[in-house]
Image: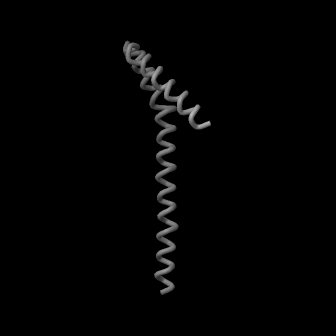
Amino acid sequence: MLTLVFICLMIGVFGKLIGLAFKMTWGIAKVLFTLVFLPFVLIALTIGGLVTIALPLVVVVGIISLVCGVVRR
């Protein structure tokens, strides 16, 4: 009986740790895509002569950043 209680508690603890790991991974992925991937895409579009695509993309990302920043405060 004590083993069953131990197994249930162990599953609960490791389940929460796995959930935390997924949340942290998602957060790190969002930060990496925002700080690393997006600037490289914009620079590549500008160098490739696709400023007509890069400029609206920058405007849309800027508006979303402003709205999310206001909502979080």
| Residue at 48%, 39% in the rendered image | 30
Image quadrant in which you'd find residue 41: top left
Image quarter where the C terminus lies is top right
* Image vertical order of residue 60 relative to residue 36, above or below: above
Residue 10 position within the rendered picture, expressed as x and y whole percent measured from the top left: 50, 72
Residue 61 position within the rendered picture, expressed as x and y whole percent measured from the top left: 47, 26
Residue 11 position within the rendered picture, expressed as x and y whole percent measured from the top left: 47, 70
Number of callouts in the render?
A: 0
* Image vertical order of residue 2 relative to residue 68, above or below: below
* Image vertical order of residue 69 relative to residue 17, above or below: above
Residue 37 position within the rendered picture, expressed as x and y whole percent measured from the top left: 45, 31
Q: Nearer the viewer, residue 72 or 60?
A: 72
| Residue at 51%, 43% in the rendered image | 28
Instruction: Report the residue that reaches farthest toward the right.
Output: 73
| Residue at 47%, 76% in the rendered image | 7
State the scheme by which the image is colored: one colour
